[in-house]
Image (cartoon, coloured by chain):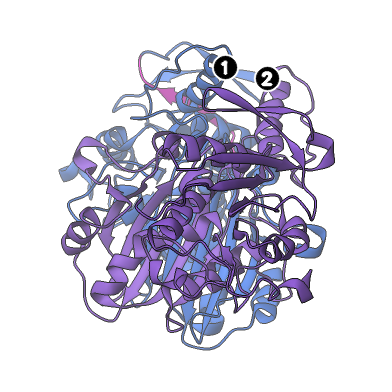
Chain colours: A purple, B blue
């Protein structure tokens, strides 16, 4: 990264959460050229320690003044926190990459997946949206196919891991299984129903049209990231008893006919994609294989024989990495590379704070 | 049932398996008017005892001569067994309801879901196919919608329970979880990969077109049961770490526009269906609720905004009951009711044996 400033201070807001910890780990693993890293969280976590490189970071309380002297902040502290604090970060001259839902659909904020729409970063105004986990892995797989054959419609059903709801949901699945195996009643606190050995067809809250917010994110964010309102997406999002790794059954219709073989070839050379598609050897993407990996895994690539131009795909990725922390760090790397680590109008978002 | 013969002997072939046991339980629970029930299985299980009503049945070895004096046989002993023995049963004058894949697509054999195509039984030739579990629950939900609005296309993704692979798969999921929670390496024997906390996008073997046999069953059996080759089905079938109950994310396109409200009203009065669709109260079908129940549960009924005439549904049923044993017993009840417990040409299938 040629455009690294001599002194670069990076903050992680929500550093103690599952995604925040993964952000720190990913900054370290990819040797992000920060001269200083600041871990921010709620007052409850202030003072606690987080491992980073060969040392420990002392968590500080996230306040409006946390961003003085900070060049870049990765937010993963929930929508409310992002709405409250991101405008102040920008006002302090800090560029924000926000993992929450707060700014994603705001017209002033680009929504970026580096493999898909890196150009959207060029005109950023200080806050950059990191998309929803389910959307990120889907668009990484769909973009090269869209470029080749023009996708008109997507029918997607997801199989989402509990880690998408944070560490408390990982603990809940584990504790429910342990209790059941010890003949005790499992308790549901994070989810409205038991998740152990069950499927929950609800992720996030319900909207007036009967879809969940998670489902509508996949519909709306896909269009924004792909930059093409002619792509129609209908989604059914489902939580399954898996710890790490989201899976997606994705059906697409294209303007141009694409054979399974052509799609496989296109995806094989696509950035951020790893094709895992050898039925004879029982090779296909699975969440237990994707966990801990950076790539989006695509397999079960088949022509959909129910329509003229259709394909079925099975898309799996680590929801905490590519679905959140890694994508945010990749955006940060791109900001450096493109020399975009600057705020044009520090007061732009203050009216919203 | 008015047409019950004075003496009615029923055999269950494969009585010791998960579905066989459930067949016996369902015959008992629904007070099927058998004067005698014979439990048949491989020589390995011969002599073992199975509970039935207030007594026990001694399992006998399944042979070509097992069906002398038997009026009705429910088979669930695997495809090979059905291919070998069903023709001999028919030759002995016994009507066979077969849960395997062996005869389902044979033109001489009707493939029946009582709520969908009871009329197909009328002209049976001695062997009646009991459809694939995933197909049964889907067509129960789709038939009333097809009647109202003419379904042209179905995109379905399944979330299938391990019990669909028999008791050994139930044991495998449990043992894998126990081992993992005790820091031991989980062993995969029934499935090609670990199923605990994983999703396996493979059910049954792969076909030359890249689909699994399970996926093609959903495509082909749906057309045969619904009696309408204009219904195009594309399926992705996935095993999930759930013990009992298959879930399905079903997207349909119809000739006539159907609102979610209309679909809900139609399904509310459909036979064998229970609508569970109240997002505000977080009510939707889940496998843990469907387990042990007879109905097909339908919820998450939404208009698909990506096309003019489309709906999304979430369909859940007990795969061992409505998906297998219950459907076979319902077919048997219908055979009695319609006075169809007779074999027209006992020699018809002998050439295939």
Residue A173's disc number: none
Tell me, yes or no, whether the two marked residues, 1 and 2, touch with CB atoms within 8 Å.
Answer: yes
Against B246, residue B269 (above or below) is below
- For the residue pair B26 and A71, the one nearer the viewer reads as A71
Against B42, residue A343 (above or below) is below
Query: Residue B248 placed where, x, y %?
Result: 52, 55
Res. B143 visible in picture: no
Query: Residue B97 placed where, x, y %?
Result: 42, 46
Against B90, residue A187 (above or below) is above
Seen at 17% across and 52% down, the residue is B208
- For the residue pair B77 and B57, the one nearer the viewer reads as B77
- For the residue pair A79 and A39, the one nearer the viewer reads as A39
Query: Would residue A208 appear left or right of B109 to someone viewing this image?
Result: right
Q: Chain of mark 1?
A: B
Query: Residue B324 placed where, x, y %?
Result: 50, 44
Q: Chain of mark 2?
A: A
Seen at 66% across and 76% down, the residue is B266
Inspect the magenta stretch and tell me whether residue B246 lies in it.
no
Q: Which element carries disc 2, helix, strand or loop?
A: helix
Query: Residue B163 placed where, x, y %?
Result: 51, 34
List the residue tagged with mark 1.
B178
Query: Would residue A83 appear left or right of B344 to someone viewing this image?
Result: right
Name the image quarter holding the C terminus of chain A. Answer: bottom right
Write the start and end of the magenta stretch as one range: B30-43
Q: Residues within 10 Å of mark 2 (few under 14, many from 20)?
A: some
- For the residue pair B196 and A47, the one nearer the viewer reads as A47
Q: How many marks?
A: 2
Residue A181's disc number: 2
């Amino acid at each position: 990264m040629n455009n690294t400033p001599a002194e670069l201070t990076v903050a992680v807001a929500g550093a103690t959460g599952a995604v925040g910890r993964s952000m720190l780990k990913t900054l370290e693993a990819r040797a992000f050229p920060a001269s200083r890293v600041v871990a921010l969280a709620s007052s409850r976590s202030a003072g606690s320690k987080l491992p980073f490189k060969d040392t420990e970071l002392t968590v500080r309380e996230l306040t409006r003044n946390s961003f003085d002297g900070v060049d870049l902040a990765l937010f993963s502290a929930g929508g409310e926190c992002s709405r409250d604090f991101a405008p102040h970060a920008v006002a302090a001259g800090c560029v924000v990459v926000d993992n929450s839902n707060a700014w994603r659909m705001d017209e002033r904020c680009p929504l970026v997946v580096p493999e898909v729409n890196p150009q959207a970063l060029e005109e950023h105004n200080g806050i950059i949206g990191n998309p929803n986990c389910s959307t990120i892995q889907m668009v990484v797989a769909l973009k090269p196919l869209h470029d080749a054959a023009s996708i008109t419609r997507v029918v997607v059903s997801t199989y989402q891991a509990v880690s998408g709801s944070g560490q408390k949901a990982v603990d809940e699945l584990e504790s429910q299984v342990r209790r059941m195996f010890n003949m005790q009643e499992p308790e549901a606190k994070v989810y409205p129903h038991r998740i152990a050995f069950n499927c929950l067809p609800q992720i996030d809250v319900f909207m007036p049209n009967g879809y969940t917010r998670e489902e509508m994110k996949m519909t709306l964010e896909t269009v924004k990231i792909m930059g093409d309102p002619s792509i129609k997406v209908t989604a059914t999002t489902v939580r399954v008893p898996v710890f790490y790794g989201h899976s997606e059954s994705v059906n697409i219709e294209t303007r141009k006919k694409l054979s399974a073989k052509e799609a496989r070839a296109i995806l094989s050379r696509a950035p951020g994609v790893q094709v895992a598609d050898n039925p004879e050897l029982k090779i296909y993407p699975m969440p237990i294989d994707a966990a801990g990996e950076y790539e989006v895994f695509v397999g079960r690539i088949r022509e959909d024989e129910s329509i003229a131009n259709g394909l079925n795909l099975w898309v799996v990725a680590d929801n905490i990495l590519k679905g959140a922390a890694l994508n945010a760090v990749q955006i940060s790397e791109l900001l450096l590379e493109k020399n975009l680590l600057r705020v044009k109008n520090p007061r732009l978002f203050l009216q919203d704070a």
